[in-house]
Image (cartoon, rainbow, N blue to C red):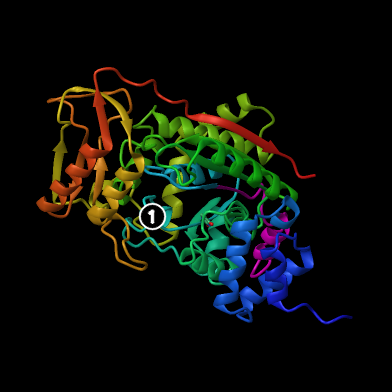
Amino acid sequence: MGARPLPQELIRAKRDGHALDREAIQQLVAGIGDGSLSDAQVGALAMAVYLRGMGREETLALTEAIRDSGEVLEWPSLDLPGPVLDKHSTGGVGDLVSLVLGPWIAACGGHVPMVSGRGLGHTGGTLDKLEAIPGYSVTPDTATFRRLVKQVGVAIIGQTADLAPADRRLYAVRDVTATVESLPLIVSSILGKKLACGLDALVMDVKTGSGAFMPTAQASRELAETIAEVASQAGTRTTALVTDMSQPLAPCAGNALEVREALRLLTGETRHGRLLTTTRTLAAELLLAGRLVDSPTAAMARLDQALASGAAAERFARMVAGLGGPADLLERPGEHLPEAPVVQAVHADRAGRVQSMDTRALGLAVVTLGGGRRLPGEAIDPRVGLSRLASLGERGDAERPLALVHAATRDDAEQAARQLRAAITVADAAAPSPSLVHDVIRREVP
Ligand code: URA
């Protein structure tokens, strides 16, 4: 057997625009995981990939190597009566789909081992939202996680040390080397983690619009297509949707406020709106990809039944209680979810219809209020955020505020009010509302 090439030779090959073979990629990812590649080498590799890109075969090999860099969960079919399903989003503002979709899918017969993340930049994170529930633990032991996925059908937790460890290191290096925005690196990072959860099917929500992480509609479409292709080739049937983020998805943004909104949806208090429609569409695609139903009509009927019967709400309540939260959160949310001391209505400078929104700026207003982090590891305030947010096309005037700001202090509320007015354009004529789902890309396992 010949000697293995030096990592610097492999980095040189990528730097010079050559494709790396599977073996080379496995060697590099192993070196990232076990620390034998230095930070300088990881950074140089990330930059070479950023500048030169990767073909489909390379991206697939990178994804599988990241997936296999730690524990890969297995769910013996004798143990679970239904398929193992999951959803992931590229992140947005007021995007609390996961909180609703996980228990909803569980109530339809799926099993959802959802490993979620924290807020990143202007986007909210599912873990931060769940931690607004007193007692909820996002780091249970493996036995509890597996038991909940089996018995309740859903557990939403944080990434464990054993899951795709190569991604943790590579992501940290990318974050400080200007190499985050690379299609093959994003795809392999997202899928490496998700596919380590042993999924039968995945639905991916790729956002587009002013609050999306991808800069253009074309970039969102390309990401969605690549994710659907690569995940399916790696053995997980995947459907990727490109959905709208040109305004916050829910009429609120902020951690406790979004949990409250999830409860409204699950208990039937909210019966329409963009959040419900988008969640229902994603959930239907997941039921189809997971073979729990054989047509879109059957998927919608199953979902509607699971919501109307209270089964989805019951799964959420059991998950919360199973992970240490209060057993009566659904019945008495006001007793458990923390509330901000200052709630202030923000009105537009002039009456008119909401014409456009800088959704990213709205997300950043929540971060400034303390609902997200300015520095890694910073504590966040679960109470703060925005509620009663006006939608595109809606009228704002002396009666109807643009939003209510929930803040820790009056000064914070004033600052957020200024950010809000700057982020929302009000004019005489409203722009047409964008469609909620731009593209649906379904891929089978070859
Ligand atoms: N989310 C991830 O997990 N990885 C990326 O590279 C980008 C978003």
Residue 270 percent across, percent down from the top left? 35, 31
Quadrant of res 68: bottom right
Q: Is residue 252 above or below residue 254?
A: above
Query: Is 256 on the left or on the right of 234, as rendered?
Result: left
Q: Position of residue 175 (x, y in %)?
A: 47, 64
Chief SS of the magenta region: loop
Q: Secondary structure at mark 1?
A: loop
Report the quarter where the N terminus lies: bottom right
**Which x, y percent locates residue 154?**
53, 51
Q: Looking at this view, is 310 or 379 the one in front?
A: 379
Count of numbered marks: 1
> Which span is picked out in magenta?
60-87
- Identify the residue position indicated by label 1 in the image: 121
Indicate whether 429 appears above or below 181. above
Inspect the magenta stretch and tell me whether residue 143 lies in it: no
Name, please, the residue furthest toward the top. 429
Q: Check the image and name the residue furthest to the right.
A: 1
Residue drawn at 59 percent across, 44 percent down: 223
Give the residue at the far front of this rendering: 16
Q: Which of the pair 120/339 is nearer the observer? A: 120
- Whether residue 63 is in magenta: the answer is yes
- Measuring 28% from the left and 23% from the top, which residue is drawn there? 394
Identify which residue is drawn at 18% across, 43% down.
418
Evaluate whether residue 292 shows in this view: no
Q: Amino acid at mark 1?
A: Gly
Q: Residues within 10 Å of mark 1 (few under 14, many from 20)?
A: some
- Relative side of 396 to 45, left or right: left
Q: Is residue 184 visible?
A: yes
Query: Where residue 91 sits: x, y (%)?
Result: 45, 47
